[in-house]
Amino acid sequence: MLINFFQTLKKLEIPVSVKEFLVLLEAMQARLAFGSVDDFYLLARSCLVKDEKYFDRFDRAFSAWFKDLESLDDVLNALVPEEWLRAEFEKYLTPEEREQIKSLGGLDKLLEEFRKRLEEQEKRHSGGSKWIGTGGTSPFGNSGYHPEGIRVGGQGRNGRAVKVWEERQYRNLDDSIHLGTRNIKVALKRLRKFARTGADEELDMDDTIYSTAKNAGFLDIKMRPERHNAVKVLVFFDVGGSMYPYVRTCEELFSAARSEFKHLKYYYFHNFLYDFVWMDNRRRREQITTTWDLLNTYPPDYKVIIVGDAAMAPYEILSPGGSIEYLNKESGAVWMDRFSRTWRRLIWLNPTPQEHWPYTQSTGIVRELVEDRMFPLTLEGLEEGARYLSS
Amino acid sequence: MGFEGTDRYVATEDLRMAVNAAVTLQRPLLIKGEPGTGKTMLAEEVARALDKQLINWHIKSTSKAQQGLYEYDAVSRLRDSQLGDGRVQDVSNYIRKGKLWTAFDSTEQVVLLIDEIDKADIEFPNDLLHELDRMEFFVYETGETITAVNRPIVIITSNNEKELPDAFLRRCFFHFIAFPDRETMERIVDVHHPDIKKSLIKEALDVFFEVREVPGLKKKPSTSELIDWLKLLMADDIPEEILKERDRSKAIPPLYGALLKNEQDVHTLQRLAFMVRREAHADR
């Protein structure tokens, strides 16, 4: 029966290996958790999960397995936490929208209705006014016009996402992709800056010979610090809905950057930079970092790379309250200005093809804000950007 | 025989399970958690509870895995050879045992603490894979293999500054010390300051959790800061009324120096207090 448990963990993509599983069995054999589910839960977690960021997933897997949910569908349903839907969703709505929701009997009803219809409906659906699908006036689906609509999966039609919830949307960028990252790594190498700092622990051959000779042949050892890559990099990733087509490219960049720099800090944001960013997408609601903190924490010698498609409504940048997530007191432009004043070496990498840039007004605004240091997320663009950063 | 926490250390159930599993199966235990939640102290207390000697290997950014095994002091040997010292003939005279070797060598089982492993170079944990797995290593200079007489209880702490390699993680048990909830916190305070007045604890905890909520603090006060602060409060005999008077305009708690370790944080708090005061004025 524990094999099933192991499989459930695997299905939820918790990185567990057979070795760890065998350790768990060994621990069971040593009677570390005997006759108590609670003990077994603690023991299994300690054996199998090696990073607190997977705790939540482990809990879901455990409860799914424990309740004997057999089909994977149920496990996947568990991935959409109910309280998230409710509490967070309600925050997003304007008073008028909330009024309108009442027309359908409140949010609870809406969500319930949504589940019901999802069950009733079996095929993919487009248009119409009842079923969940794309482009209709039913409250559920994608790219629709119902004010209380819930968007399900899919991509925003014009790249202007409004209140998206979609399970894959807020995944953390995966840095385990290695294919195709080599080229990016080579481009990033430009950023390298070697420096000798820290304790003396390497034999300085030249100096030793020189000083021994000077000492009339009596050995005089000279040491020097080791060489390190001293460059410090701060990366911000846009994880908004319109970035969805570029997730793979971003993952590659992220993966390459991760292995290239010792001092690499990364944060996520949605569409534009405002009061806060977050480090872990899965826990973006609880664990936010205020942007002031970043500005105060990282000294000006950090190189800043912002990755985003810069495609949004102009008011999202220019006016206070423009964020699609919450009511921001200061406009994105004000924050951007603070950024470029704090970190002089700042570039914006844009994954959309450069020839499309003129067609999006916001891209022009952002380019102005970053003083034209926007580069396409291609090898050449990256190299050019790296050249600027290291200059 | 298991670890149940001690009179000086409150161990939650999940922590006890992790420690006991690691001790029983003789595998390293990796402890993560916010700074100041008692990661290092855990090793000390495990050693005390199980009545074993503690060997502390504190990792710095310059630490190398090899230093934990042994170091070959080629420089003094070279020097001795120039001075004609007889000891030069035997290479083992110049091999200095590291912490890991000392732990392996011990005739009784010891507790080995590898503190703040994330401070070291990225490759550091990888270099210790085999040593921690098999509890043996090879000394090239003398050609001998050192095997642990008694497999030590290895406790490793990390502040999450760098991610640890998967291969390393796979060999460890893992526990994340979550920030204690109110109830656990009261027990912890009780363990450290048994004679503190109940009401003082309550008021102090209120203030403490409130300060933790203040947005934009560089370093949120944690358990160890709370303990220090309470010590000061008691020594100073601050009447609890002062703590109770939670007028927002006086947002700076007394003796805040123990709670906030950062000048900027103090400024943040003062600025907040000022803003609250100003708003109160405007209301009037």
Image: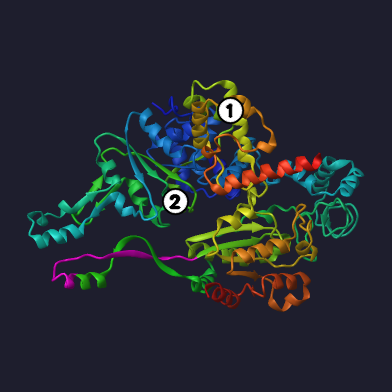
- Please tell me whether mark 2 sits on a helix, a strand or a loop: helix
Relative horizontal placement of residue A383, taking residue B49 as reference (left or right) = right
The answer to which image quadrant residue A90 occupies is top right
Where residue A360 appears, as percent x and y from the top left, is: 77, 72
Numbered label tally: 2
Chain ID at mark 2: B
Chain letter behind tag 1: B
Question: Vertical placement of B13 versus B169: above or below?
Answer: above
Expressed as whole percent of the image width and height from the top left, the position of residue B209 reads 61, 35
Q: Disc 1 marks which amino acid?
A: Glu
Q: Nearer the viewer, residue A5 or A333?
A: A333
Q: Residue at x 55, y 73 (%)?
A: A386
Sequence-earlier tag: 2 or 1: 2
Q: Badge 1: few (under 14), some or many (20 or more) residues near its Cα, within 10 Å?
A: few
Using a 10 Å C-alpha cutoff, classify the residue at mark 2 as few (fewer than 14 neighbours), some (14 to 19) or many (20 or more). Answer: many
Residue B82 versus residue B49 in the image, above or below: below
Asked whether residue B158 is drawn in magenta, I would say: no
Q: Amino acid at mark 2?
A: Asp
Magenta stretch: residue A226 in it? yes
Q: Which mark is residue A61?
A: none
Whether residue B217 is visible here, answered yes or no, is: no
**Taking the image as drawn, is residue A162 in sight?**
yes
**Mark 2 and mark 1 on one chain:** yes
From the top left corner, tell me how far across and down residue B268 is, in percent.
62, 47
Residue for point 87% across, 41% down: A106
For label 2, the residue is B118
> What range of the chain is rendered magenta?
A212-231
Q: CA distance from mark 2 to mark 1?
A: 30 Å
The residue positioned farthest toward the right in the image shown = A103
**Residue carrying label 1:** B183
